[in-house]
Amino acid sequence: MKRIHLVILAILILVFVLITITKGSFSITLWRAGFSSANIQTLVRSFDDNGNEIKIIKTNSKKNDIVLAYLIKNKFGFWKVGYFTPSSSNNLAVIEWMRWSTVRRFKADENPLFEAEYHKIYYGNNAIKRIEFLPGQIPENVAVSIWQAGKEYYIHLICFGTGDASPLNSINIPSLLLKNKCLAN
């Protein structure tokens, strides 16, 4: 009888430990990657092409004030850092990703047309005025979302395309921000 109680107690402790580790895996993942878990801002929360939850976050590390990280949650509830980009010398970090959005075809025997959804986020803390773009600076097929609080800001660009190269690569956001006198040199 005592053995059965010990086995049940051991199973309950094991389940509790696994639940605790799963719930804390986000902070543990950041800590293991050398990032701060105290200064996190979730910029995007979505799902990848495999159905896994993803998060694009802004955090920091001992070496960099701004780090953008692409995190993936697997089927078991554990997070991992897919990749990350630290800020450059101009206090600007950039991260980009893509996912497949649609497959189009008219007839079953023709080659399908694959469309991808391209994303790019710029995050900085050196704005000197409200972030704005003049007409014609951003192509028509690009959606822009801007968040700003004082000097700190992020710009999220989204567009759709059919090819390997992202159409967002042709937009030089840092030079546009300098040209529009939105950033300190």
Image (tube, rainbow, N blue to C red):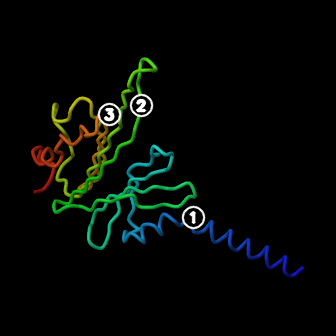
Q: Nearer the viewer, mark 1 or mark 2?
A: 2
Whole-angstrom CA distance, mark 1 to mark 2, is 33 Å
The earlier-in-sequence mark between 1 and 2 is 1
| Circles 1 and 2 in contact, beta carbons < 8 Å | no
Whole-angstrom CA distance, mark 1 to mark 3, is 35 Å
Mark 3, residue position: 160
Tell me which amino acid carries mark 2.
Thr
Q: Which mark is residue 22?
A: 1
| Disc 1 element | helix
Up the image or down, 146 lies above or below 84; here it is above
Q: On the picture, is 48 further left or further right than 163?
A: right
Q: Position of residue 33 (x, y in %)?
A: 39, 69
Q: Residues within 10 Å of mark 1 (few under 14, many from 20)?
A: some
Q: Position of residue 24 (x, y in %)?
A: 53, 67
Q: Position of residue 90 (x, y in %)?
A: 16, 59
| Circles 3 and 2 in contact, beta carbons < 8 Å | no
Front residue of 21 and 90 = 21
Q: Position of residue 49 (x, y in %)?
A: 45, 43
| Disc 2 element | strand
